[in-house]
Image: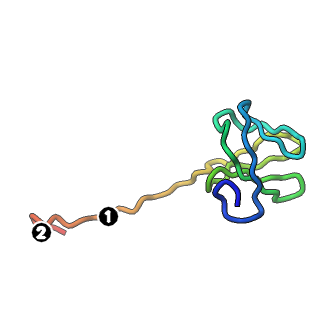
Amino acid sequence: MACGLVGIDYRDALVANCGRICIYRKKVNISTVLAGQKLGIKEVDDGIWLVSFMHYDLGYIDLEQRTLQTIDNPFGTRLSPIVVLPDFETKAW
């Protein structure tokens, strides 16, 4: 298990202070915002890697380009359920 991701297909990659990770001796620019954080990386095709942080897919790395191609909105829309509680004083439901 790597960086909180379920599955044995993921590997850990530590983001350096300069914002890069190394895959097969190739330095890939991610972001200095994630410096010091572990990312999960998984090869999904020959030379194409899926990059995840916690339970969110951030994007894909092509080892030839050595940059992260981000997903439009990695966090997606998540709606919180609305709970309506009864007002016991007015007995309005």
Left or right for 5, reference 83? right
**Figure quadrant of residue 88:** bottom left
> Mark 2: which amino acid?
Lys
For image coordinates 75% across by 44% down, the residue present is 69
**Whole-percent x, y for residue 72 in the image:** 65, 47
Question: What is the secondary structure assignment of the residue under circle 1?
Answer: loop
For image coordinates 85% across by 58% down, the residue present is 45
The local crowd at label 1, few if under 14, some if 14 to 19, many if 20 or more residues have their Cα within 10 Å, is few
Judge whether 37 appears above or below 18 on screen: below
Left or right for 82, reference 69? left
Q: Quadrant of the N terminus?
A: bottom right
Q: Which residue is mark 1?
A: 83
**Marked residue nearer the N-terminal end (1 or 2):** 1
For image coordinates 63% across by 53% down, the residue present is 56
> Mark 1: which amino acid?
Val
Q: Which residue is mark 2?
A: 91
Are the residues flagged by discs 1 and 2 in contact, CB closer than 8 Å? no
**Figure quadrant of residue 21:** top right
Question: What is the secondary structure assignment of the residue under circle 2?
Answer: loop
For image coordinates 77% across by 55% down, the residue present is 11
